[in-house]
Amino acid sequence: MKRTTIKDIAQQLGINPSTVSRALKDHPDIGAALRAEIKQLAAQMHYRPNHMAVYLRQRSSKLVGLIVPEVTMFFYPSVMKGIQNVLHDAGYNLIMLPSNESLEREVENIRICYENDVAGIMLSFSRYRHTTEQLSTLEEMGAPVVMFDKIIEDLPYDAIILEDFQSAYSAISHLIATGCKKIAGIFGNPDLRITQLRLDGFKQAIKDAGLECRDEYICFSNSSYEAERDARHLMASADPPDGIFAMTDEIIIGSLPSIVRSGKNIPEECSIICISDGFLPYCLHPKVTFLHHDGYEVGKLTAQRMLKLIEDGEFSNNNYKGTVTMLKPPLIELGTTRTLKSSTK
Amino acid sequence: MKRTTIKDIAQQLGINPSTVSRALKDHPDIGAALRAEIKQLAAQMHYRPNHMAVYLRQRSSKLVGLIVPEVTMFFYPSVMKGIQNVLHDAGYNLIMLPSNESLEREVENIRICYENDVAGIMLSFSRYRHTTEQLSTLEEMGAPVVMFDKIIEDLPYDAIILEDFQSAYSAISHLIATGCKKIAGIFGNPDLRITQLRLDGFKQAIKDAGLECRDEYICFSNSSYEAERDARHLMASADPPDGIFAMTDEIIIGSLPSIVRSGKNIPEECSIICISDGFLPYCLHPKVTFLHHDGYEVGKLTAQRMLKLIEDGEFSNNNYKGTVTMLKPPLIELGTTRTLKSSTK
DNA sequence: AACGTTTGCGCAACTGTTTGCGGAAAAAAC
DNA sequence: GTTTTTTCCGCAAACAGTTGCGCAAACGTT
């Protein structure tokens, strides 16, 4: 069935398309009577504006690209939810572009954004992205860019990230404060910047407490399955740790069963803490103390920043220099760490 | 920076835009020499076709709408992955439209698809959708529609779903065959059709085995948290079940800790089985026997059906009558059900 | 009554790309 | 050397909607 256009309405009423266009957007040039008539007929004919045509004329698409390294059940669903809620209210739509952890695909996704003339790009880089190589398209486009989570520092774009170093540092400090002496860390892909930062925080906290940081207590797991294996080995070693830090949801869900199976009392013999989106720790058994890395909040902030950039338009003209927003994750104690002997009270 | 258009190239070479257009798509009308020259300049000027303009001219957008009830960490990430992989290879892009479990938003999402003139819509309905009310826009559009997972039967569209009744039936039959007598089921939202079907399969299997189906063994949980509570109550009751069926990933992740905390031996005193996307059961402790409801496969099939409908174009003209594809989930035994006393071997 | 202002609408050009048609020049056929 | 065919490219319209400009009619002011 042919879609009703603005011309159809105009013809029907014997008037000019431009009049219809103006009437529908309450332009004062059009008289109240005619305007009402036009609107009524438009509704009756189920008129819906054609976004593409509008775009073509005024060069402002209502599409925003979202490039993520992969669609996993961890973190990204929350981020997407946050992004969607903000964008939808502003009348923007999201086009999803997973890179499947491939640099090539990432570059292609940027190209797709270009071809679809998105109003802006929100992106989180794949794990293999270490340099700004092949990212020139991003500049050429002139569209605003906001990075989140997995970012590259040298780029002149806004970024929304977690306080990675500080989070790990606090987590470990909490373990130490509650009596742990031999702390192990299970980390994600060592190529990732967030892994590096969290590892640094981990090491620094141990060092600052005057404890020894042992290499055999540091593992890198690329998946939940690897985390399961790494945790198993840790617990089965001659001198198992009495505190374990899991870097992400993906890590904790994999490693927790291994820790539980070891038969150690939790948290008395072995404390556990992780950085999490905030859902899983409540579901696991036992419930795991965590630092709340709120994906929804990251998504919300990313989208809000995006909208601001789009609407202000301060992006393309001068050489924009991005600002980094860091989120400070609160500590949520659920029982896998010992309680602090509270001095007062 | 201004985007280079086909006109820019034409002007640069002192020729007509139409010539450039034809040259770029290897139209035989254009001489080999000129064609090469055009292509070279196009590459040099970083020319990228403007999708919107192309669409406007030939009425075929490369956008496909994906309407889901909600962006959760369960099932949908897999589905999206399957969909993306298929669509991307065919040159289509995905526009994400979560309905947040709201009927109103669902209708609006359909309208958004209409305005963006998507080539097709893939949708999974929200839990409150029981009738075809307000779904007339779907027909008016004339765009192909493929439903998946949460579907409405009376609609004349293709559908990709799981064998819900049969899955639950097999799961329960397996519990019974391995010695369970008092089987409880933890289900999702009772409004959902898949809940109803799985519940029916559950009941039928118990009935067919000549066992008693007790009302107090049937719970409906709207979230992981509710599932945790329901499982806790079940295990704490005077006569706890010796077999538990969890309808989804969301249910099992919530209820498993409660079951484990009850202290019962698994699977000797209490067997557990669930329907799952296939990731979680391996991560949980203990690993849970499940029927593999493969979200990736659902997504893949949905997208493939979509492409076929778009390309064949057999959709809009005659009154299309959808076909339903049912996926048969395999049983994966991971240890929370007792082993069948194999007669042979 | 003559002039200035406001109101209300139409005309036409423009966005980037595609495509049917037409036509000049070159090549081929006679 | 003329006619026919082929090769190669330009012209212009079309897609749906927006917008600067123009212009007539109605209104308001001396």
Image (spheres, coloured by chain):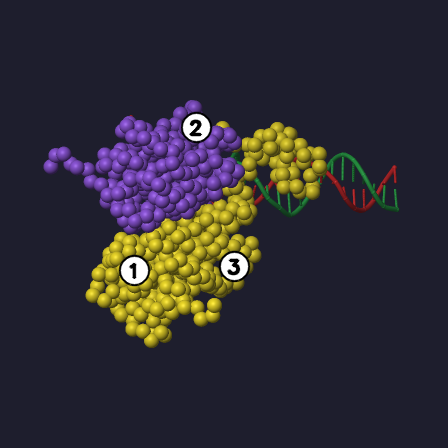
Chain colours: A purple, B yellow, C green, D red
Work out whether mark 3 precedes mark 1 in sequence or the reverse, and give the earlier one.
1
Q: Which label number is shown at residue A248?
A: none
Label 3: which residue? Answer: B315
One can see residue B3 in this view: yes
Report x, y in % for residue A280.
31, 47
In the displayed structure, would residue A14 be above or below residue B329? above
**SS of the residue under disc 3:** loop
Whether labels 1 and 2 belong to a single chain: the reply is no
Report x, y in % for residue A73.
39, 47
- Tag 1: Cα neighbours inside 10 Å, few (<14), some, or many (≥20)? few
The amino acid at mark 3 is: Phe
Q: Residue at x 49, y 38 (%)?
A: A106
Q: Is B123 left, or right, of A166 in this rendering?
A: right
Whether labels 3 and 2 belong to a single chain: the reply is no
Q: Which label number is shown at residue A155?
A: 2
- Closer to us: mark 1 or mark 2? 1
**Contact (CB < 8 A) between labels 3 and 1?**
no
Q: Which chain letter matches label 3? A: B
Disc 1 to disc 2, C-alpha distance: 55 Å
- Tag 2: Cα neighbours inside 10 Å, few (<14), some, or many (≥20)? some
Label 1: which residue? Answer: B265
The amino acid at mark 1 is: Asn
Q: Residue at x 29, y 30 (%)?
A: A211
Report x, y in % for residue A99.
48, 41
